[in-house]
Image: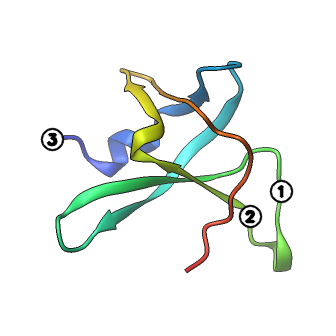
Amino acid sequence: MIKLSELQVKEVIIVNDGRKLGHISDLEIDPDRGKILALVIYLREKKGGFFGKPEELMIYWEQIVTIGSDVILVKDVNGPRLYIE
């Protein structure tokens, strides 16, 4: 089993173009099944969104190509989709 703190030190990179997205800030978990639905990433290129809150990008579990020793490779990331509670 891997801990969130171990995932947070891995850089998230888009496999299609090599763009670095940043690091995981949180996880979205299905409370009924206890499975990870998505990784939540604070976007690097944005210093702050509305009211100084940084934008967050959801990377859904199906978009993860591999989780390596120091990076997480993802695919099909078209652009920021805000995480709204």
Q: Which residue is mark 2?
A: 54
**Helix, strand, or loop for circle 2?**
loop
Q: CA distance from mark 1 to mark 2?
A: 6 Å
Circle 1: residue type: Lys
- Give whichever of 65, 7 is nearer the camera: 65
Q: Determine the residue positioned at 19% across, 63% down.
A: 34
Q: CA distance from mark 1 to mark 3?
A: 33 Å
Q: Position of residue 69 (x, y in %)?
A: 36, 21
Q: Which residue is mark 3?
A: 1
Circle 3: residue type: Met
Q: Determine the residue positioned at 71% across, 19% down.
A: 17
> What is the tally of numbered marks visible in this picture?
3
Q: Position of residue 41 (x, y in %)?
A: 58, 51
Q: Which residue is mark 1?
A: 47
Q: Position of residue 73 (x, y in %)?
A: 50, 26
Q: Is the residue under label 3 in contact with that under label 2 (CB below 8 Å)?
A: no
Left or right: 27 as drawn, with respect to 16: left
Upstream in the sequence, badge 1 or badge 2? 1
Circle 2: residue type: Pro
Upstream in the sequence, badge 1 or badge 3? 3
Q: Quadrant of residue 1?
A: top left
Q: CA distance from mark 2 to mark 3?
A: 29 Å
**Helix, strand, or loop for circle 3?**
loop
10 Å crowding of disc 3: few (<14), some (14-19), many (20+) = few
Q: Is the residue under label 2 in contact with that under label 1 (CB below 8 Å)?
A: yes
